[in-house]
Amino acid sequence: MQEHDLLATSWTWAGDEPIADRVRAVGDAGFSGLSLSLDDLHEVRATTGFSALRRVLDRAGIVWVQLGPLDRWWDHDGRATDAEADRGVVLEAAATLGAWQVVVRADTGVHPVTPAAMTADFTDLAAQAEEVGARLVLEPEPWSNLPTIERASRFVAAAGHANAGLLLDAMHTLRGGSTLASIAQGVGPGVLAAVELSDGLLHTPPG
């Protein structure tokens, strides 16, 4: 991305209006990119198709496309059918839309797998994303098995795939207990692929 390009994440422009209208609103607001959720991707594939969406993006001046977040991408007693469908729609969309990044989450389940058990699947997915021209980026969350940006950075570095990186979400990172000093020390510049700004609360409200 260029130095001052901004990308609207999927929550920024979510809504019930037709996706083409929402894309135009994102472009009119001055964004150069946007993130497409899995729900949007499944809807587009079932209706207009990704080639038509690419034309809508071009008319709106949207250059950068991010997809996801993709969940349950690791092998845990065999991936479920819907998880495979999500992976398929993301890779298909990435190829047609010329996506910049594919975002993945860590395990947020009640009984999560160990990060080590996810490494091989992570590198495999990074290679698949590379084949369609996108970079794989991991977004750590405090309630996942990679709860801090520093631990997630070590996971990505240990995986060792050049097409894999890290997405730093400001809210998730601070809620996970990280500080600017710990980020500077624990996150290598070669690993950091994107930074997501957020107006969420630092602490989760009670109730």
Image (tube, helix red, strand yellow):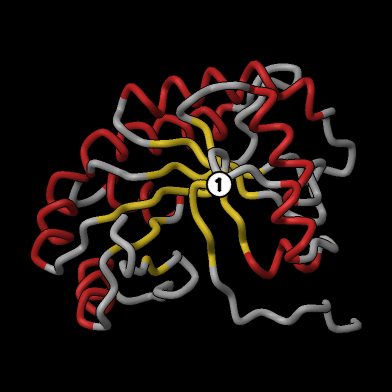
Determine whether, in the image, residue 164 is placed left or right of residue 42: right
Q: Nearer the viewer, residue 187 or 119?
A: 187
Q: Residue at x 17, y 60 (%)?
A: 57
> Which residue is tagged 1?
192
Instruction: Determine whether the residue tagged by mark 1 lies in a helix, strand or loop.
Output: strand
Query: What x and y, as percent, mark residue 68?
Result: 48, 48
Quarter occupied by residue 31: bottom left
Q: Nearer the viewer, residue 97 or 156?
A: 156
Location of the N terminus (image quadrant): bottom left
Location of the C terminus (image quadrant): bottom right
Three-letter residue code for mark 1: Leu
Q: Nearer the viewer, residue 9 or 17?
A: 9
Q: Residue at x 8, y 65 (%)?
A: 59
Estimate how packed mark 1 is, as few (under 14), some (14 to 19) or many (20 or more) residues with alpha carbons within 10 Å. Answer: some
Query: What x and y, as percent, mark residue 48?
Result: 18, 51
Task: Specify whether residue 141 is in view.
Answer: yes
Determine whether, in the image, residue 164 is placed left or right of residue 155: left
Q: Nearer the viewer, residue 48 or 164?
A: 164
Query: What x and y, as percent, mark residue 43?
Result: 34, 52
Residue 149 vertical position relative to residue 118 in the rendered view, above or below: below
